Structures are given as C-alpha cells and as structure tokens.
Amino acid sequence: MKQMPFGRLVGFPALLSAFLLCGKVTAQSDEVREAAKTITADGMMKHIRVLSSDEFEGRAPGTPGEEKSVNYIRDQFQSIGLKPGNPAGIYIQNVPLVGFTAQPTISFTAGSQKIDFKSPNDAVVWSRHFEPDVKVEDNPVVFVGYGVVAPEYGWDDFKGVDVRGKTLLMLINDPPVPDPADPDKLDPKMFKGREMTYYGRWTYKYEIAAAKGAKAAIIVHQTGPAGYPWGVVMMSNGRENFGLQTPDAISNRVAVEGWVTLDNARKMVSAAGADFDALKKSAVSRDFRPVELNLKANIDVRSTIRQVASRNVVAKVEGSDPKLKDQYIIYTAHWDHLGRDPKLKGDQIYNGALDNASGTAALLEIARAYTKVKPKRSVLFLSVTGEEKGLLGSKYYAEHPLYPLTQTLADFNIDGVNVWGKTRDVGVVGMGQSTLEDALAKVVKEQGRVLVQESDPTKGHYFRSDHFEFAKVGVPALYLDRGNEYVGKPKDFGARKRDEYVARDYHQVSDEIKPDWDLSGAVEDMQLFFETGYEVAQGDQFPQWKAGSEFKDRRDRMMQGK
Ligand SMILES: [Zn+2]
C-alpha cells in the first residue's frame, strides 16, 4: 500500500487527516478502481456460457471436456496478455491422477469370535497405495479417541504411545469439550466451540494416522458430528475414486483407510470386552491415552486402478518491483466438474454452470483486471483440476509448487459466485483464520458493505475447496461466502435461494445458467477480491495466520526453514 506523504497532512483539519490515513486504499490510486470496473457481468457470462455448454461435456478430467476446458482457459489467458505461469514457459502444470475402485473384504476377530462386515453397508474401506491388492492381517486395533494432536490446545491423544503398524479406530469431529461455565455448551476456548476445526475432518484423521506410522485407520461414523448420513459415505465409496499418482503415495498414507457405522463399532468393541460409550467419554479429555483393544483386523482391499493424465492451467502477471517480483499472490478456481453420466435418462451432462464455470469466469475477469495495473509482486492465476475428486489439482500444486511457498503470500479462491443480485453483506468462510480478512474488511467497508461470518460455520466449509490445500501447507488462504442480505429483496431471499440451489441443482445435471441470474453481486464480490489481492501484492507485510489458527504453526516453521 502506498504511504501518504506525511508533510501534506500537516495543518489539515484533524478529521480530514484521519480520513486520509484510514482511507489508504481510496488514496492509493484511481487506477486500481478503474481496473476493478473492467470486471463485468457480461464479461463473466460470456465465459460461463462457453464453459457450461453441452459441448464441454461437464468438464471431467481425462475426457474430451478437459481438452476443451484447458484449451479455452489457456487461450483466454494468452489473449488477455498474461505470461505462462509455469517457469518452463508453458501455461500447463501436469497433474497425474489415478482412478481406483475398491472391492474389499473386512473382518475383525476378538479371541475366537469373528465378525464379518459387509461393504458398503457395515463398513467401507479403500487403499490409497494404488496397488491391486493391499492386505492388513491379524493386525492389533488401537482406539485413539479423536486422534488429535493440537499444540495450540495442549492436546495430544497419542501421548507418545507407539501405534506404528497398527490399525487405529478413531472418532469423527473435534473433541466436544464442555464449557466449564455451562456444561450444556461447548467450551469456546477449545477447538473453537461449535465451529469445526480441521482436527475434526476425516481427512485430518487419515493424515495423522499416517504421520504416526499406523497401518490402517478406521473412523467411526456418526451422522451428527460427521455432518452427513452413512448413505453419503456408502455412495462416495461404491464408485471410482481418485487420488494423485505420486512416488511418495506409500509413505504418505496408511495402507487402508475407511469408515465403520456406529452400531458396528459398538459391536466390535463389545466383542473385545470393552464398552464403546465409556471409551468415547474418556476421549473427551486431555488425559486420554490410546487403548489397545483385544481385537485384530483382517482387511483385504483389491482395487482396479487406472491412470488419468490431467492438467492445471496457470498464467501470471509479473510483478513490477525488481525486489518483490519473485513473491507471489495466487488466485485459484477449479475448472473441473462431474462430466457426463451415460446411465442417466434425458439430460446426461453435469454442466456445472455455478460450480465452477462461474468461478473460472471470475478468475479470467480478475486476471484481465490485473493487466491494467502494475502490482509490485507477481500474481499467479491457477485454474485447477480435480477439485470435485478431492481438491486434487490444488493439492498437487501445494505439494509441487512452481514457486517457493515461502515466497507465496496468499491464496484467494473462488468456487461458485453469487448469481442472485447485490448483497449488503459478504461472508468470509473460516472467519478469524488470517489477517487476509482484515485487508478484505477495509475494501468491503469502502464498498459500503459489511463483512459477516459464513452462514454455517459448523460444517467445516473452510476445508472443502481449493484454498484449503494452501492453508494446509501453511499459506494464508481466503474464501468468500456469498452474502445473505439481498438489496431490495425480502429478508429470507438469500437463504431461500441457497437452500433451493443445494436441494435442486448442486451436483445435479440442472446446474445450468438460469433465466433469473443476476451477476451484479458477483461483480462487487470479484472487484473486492481483486482489490484485496492488489493490497496484499503491494503491502509491506506478509499476511499472517491469527493466533489460535490450526495452520499458524506450519507457516511459522516453514518461514524458519523447518
Ligand atoms: Zn466447486
């Protein structure tokens, strides 16, 4: 941000000086304002029409739809005048995906008693080692509670107990620590109270299990804490799933990952002569220690595997400051969607107009706005693949960055824009995580709008789109939620439209451009994202994770070269 020359303020009325001092962005340049205005609804619609057309076949990785999407985005970057984002001089980062379908057999033995589980009704398991046959034989089962290691809460469920080579039985969600002042409520000082932290997500559970050297990790499913019923777990595992084909797949993951229903977890644990509910209760305490059960796991995962070569598209606006141009701000939006399903009657194409042709269109518009200004730092535009298959394109970038992560200041992610008109408010997902939201708040205020918390912070949305892969490796990341208070509309309009979208169109073939779409609100949100990113690109400080963020430790260690 540009500093106001102090001398010019001397003698100004106090109020006016104060205004100029806090109004740094306003003061910084009309050029930025003018550039922001080049982001338009028509500009976005033009791209959405192309990307969500039937011709693009739902943009699934590894299909002709990928070819068309990648070519379109690359050509747009090129014609806007952006440079190739890959230092190799190309607009592409190759992302090797692997598709796998598991056919498992699962049983547990307690002494002479053998319990067989049917997949996917009783339990589901899979292997991300991507080998045709992975076995866990006569393997001791250890109950590790919530499996959480959170230094900022003084919490460690493992207590140094050696679980290497064993099967971990784990609980979903954060430890629900009661508030000492009111035991009916959750302690707001522990794991952010009702809000979900990353320690609560299933992905975290498998990661910590791998970090501890376990052989297998099985999560006990509970509808409330997981946020979705068993049917969702069953469905997502009955079909082909995807991962990244990397040489370290075996060292980075446990051999077998999975879920078991609550009833079947109870059954296993009681066969082992223990009481599941008592164990679960004991896990809601800092003093919890892993409990080895009188139980052995026998799991055999046979998988059919195929390789799918996919691509991220990447372009950049080079920084104008010779000292700062090797530092980066990244904007991300996933181009992929669900493709087509030949088994469907009638419409077979998942057009993904909102999810995420709209975000891709916004990314292109923001990129174009950046060509009108000269940011000091470089700005990277990363259109990622495989989001719908598990944030795979962004994960690949975060694990194989084209520029050092220590020189990467922030990620701004766009996944679905507001298509229902202007809002007075704008939501930030995962509020309280980083100082990026302070930079955002300033620009929001200038727009005459207000910054609010996302509509449902208990669902862990901060962990569900591409920015999260950046957060996980330590890079501060920002993700907006559309506002709720629509200008000139009834109070419940926003909630109603949102619910309607989730119920009817989300991940359905009907996610198409609708006649009532109004992108005027999206324009404001994207101007906001552009100006906030620009602020960071000019700023004299790196954005920081706030105290209490579960990602702060990782960033601090990275910056210290650890
Ligand atoms: Zn999406």
Image (spheres, helix red, strand yellow):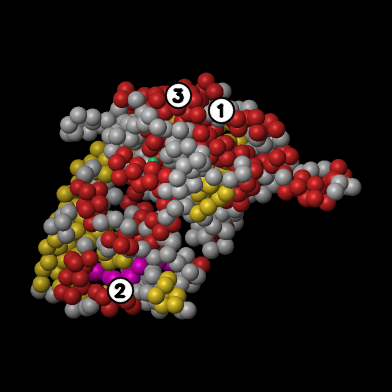
Residue 544 located within the stretch drawn in magenta: no
Does 347 appear above or below 271? above
Q: Position of residue 179 (x, y in %)?
A: 45, 75
Mark 2 — residue?
A: 280
The three-letter code of the residue at mark 2 reads Lys
Q: Position of residue 217 (x, y in %)?
A: 29, 61
Q: Can you see residue 312? A: no
Check whether the beta carbons of the residues at disc 1 and disc 3 lie within 8 A of each other.
no
Q: Which residues are magenta?
A: 137-149
Majority secondary structure of magenta residues? strand
Residue at the image position 24 percent from the left and 74 percent from the top: 276
The three-letter code of the residue at mark 3 reads Lys
Q: Earlier in the sequence, mark 1 or mark 3?
A: 3
Foreground residue, 373 or 66?
373
Q: Is the CB atom of the residue marked by disc 3 within 8 angstroms of ligand 1's nearest atom?
A: no
Label 1 packing within 10 angstroms: few (<14), some (14-19), many (20+): many
Q: Is residue 389 left or right of residue 135?
A: right
How far apart in space, not on screen, are marks 3 and 2 (Cα)?
A: 53 Å
Mark 1 — residue?
A: 368
Q: Earlier in the sequence, mark 1 or mark 2?
A: 2
Residue 46, label in figure: 3
Label 3 packing within 10 angstroms: few (<14), some (14-19), many (20+): few
Residue 139 located within the stretch drawn in magenta: yes
Locate the N terminus by quadrant.
top right
Q: Position of residue 330 (x, y in %)?
A: 54, 40
The residue mark sitting in front, 1 or 3, is: 3
- Residue 275 in which image quadrant: bottom left
- Residue 182 in which image quadrant: bottom left
